[in-house]
Amino acid sequence: MKIIKSAESVCQGHPDKTADIIADAILDELLIKDPYTRASIEVLITTGLVHVSGELSTDAYVDIPNIARGTLIEIGYTKPEYGFDGYTAGVISTISDQSPEIALGVPSDGAGDTCIVVGYATSETENYMPLACNIANKITFMIDELRKDDIVPFFRPDGKAVVVVEYEDGKPVRIDSITVLVQHEPYVSELELRNAVEEKVIKQIVPEEFVDKNTDIVINPIGRFIIGGPMADTGLTGRKTIADAYGTAAASGGSAFSGKDPTKIDRSASYMARHIAKHIVASGIANECNVEMVYVIGGEYPVSFNIKVDTEIDTTKLNKKVKEIFDLSPGGIIEYLKLRRPIYKETSHYGHFGRSHEDFTWEQLNKKIMEELKNVF
C-alpha cells in the first residue's frame, strides 16, 4: 500500500522561526544567571518591531532589547533594504510576573502545565527520524550556511522547504516532490537562483536513490521573492510545531516548545517521549514507535501513558518496563536530560529532534537501556 508523508522546515529568517529563536535566546540568558528560572516567553515580530511578552519567575535580570537585536543580527537581518534589521528595530518588552496561583499551585517537582505530548521514532533513517524531516531540515540549514558564509551572496534570510515522500509497505521508496522558497536579492535572475538551489543545495543533500523522473522539484513557485521576513509577514512564537517535530509522520501534541523553561512539561516531556521512542526502535523491538503522555498541572506523574509500535508485542509489558527504567516525573525528566542548562537557542531551528548536537541529551542512546528493553521479550 502506498502512503505519503511530508515535512516542512524553515530558515532562521522566517518570521515565525525568528520569533522562536529570540524567545529561546532570552531563555538561555536567564538560565545562565538563574537555572531555576520559570519562563513562558512569547515574541511577536512585525515591520521594524519586536514585541516580547510573557511571564517570568526568576532572580535573574537580562537585557531583553539587546538580546533581541543581537539575535536578529546573528540571523542575518543586517541591512535596511530588508525592511527589518537588528540595528534599527524597536523592541517592546511587556514581561510580567508569573501568576501567583500557578506559583503556589505547582510544586517544585510538579508539572508546570496541562498537556498532551508525543514522541516518535522510526528505523527508516540512521537518526531514527522520518526521511522527509531530515531532507527538509538539511535544505534549510544549507541555505542558511551558504548565505551566512557569503558563498551564495544573493540569498536573503527568509526561506522554507517542503518535502513529500512516498512509502510502500511502510518504507520510503521515492521522493514525490521538493518545494523550496528562498528570499533573494533583486538583481538575481530566476534561472540563476534556480541553478544555485539545485546545484548547491538539492544535489548536495537529497539522496539520488529516492529521486526519479517523476519527482517534482519546485523553486520559488510564484517567481520573485524579494520582500520577505517580518516586512512581509508577522512572526509569532509557536507557529511551526509540525516543522519543529516530525512532520506528518506523527501526531502533534499541540504545544509549542520555544520560550518555555523545562518545568513546562509540554516541552521537557516531549523531549523525554522522543528519547523513549528512539530507544525502543534502536533496541530492535519495533521499526516505528509512538509514545503518548498526558500531564495535569501540578501533577507528579503522567495521568496517561501509552506506547504504540508496529510489531506484535505485548505493549502492556513494554509500558511497565519503560516506567521502571525512566522517571517520568517533571523533576526526574529535568534531572535525567540535564535540562536546566542554556541549551535552547540551538534547539529552536532545524527541528528539536534527530540532531547529533552534544547538548541534545534526548537524542543520546544508552546501550544498557536498549538491552533492558530488548530482554523484556
Image (spheres, rainbow, N blue to C red):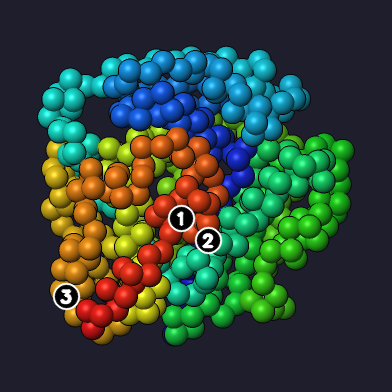
Q: Is residue 19 above or below residue 56?
A: below
List x then y, in percent, for residue 282.
Answer: 40, 73
- The residue beneath circle 3 is 317
Residue at x 36% of width, y 37% of height: 340
- Marks 2 and 3: CB-CB under 8 Å? no
Q: Is residue 246 above or below residue 360?
A: below
Q: Quadrant of the N terminus?
A: bottom left
List x then y, in percent, for residue 310.
Answer: 32, 79
Q: Is residue 259 left or right of residue 153?
A: left
Q: Amino acid at mark 2?
A: Cys
Foreground of the two, 356 or 223: 356
Mark 3 secondary-structure assignment: helix
Gap in Å between the C-alphas at discs 2 and 1? 10 Å
Q: Amino acid at mark 3?
A: Lys
For the question of whether residue 237 can be seen, the reply is no
For the question of whether residue 132 can be seen, the reply is yes
Residue at x 64% of width, y 51% of height: 140
Gap in Å between the C-alphas at discs 2 and 3? 31 Å
Residue at x 69% of width, y 64% of height: 205
Mark 2 secondary-structure assignment: helix
Mark 1 secondary-structure assignment: loop
Gap in Å between the C-alphas at discs 1 and 3? 27 Å
Q: Is residue 367 left or right of residue 99?
A: right
Ranked by sequence position, the earlier of labels 2 and 1 is 2
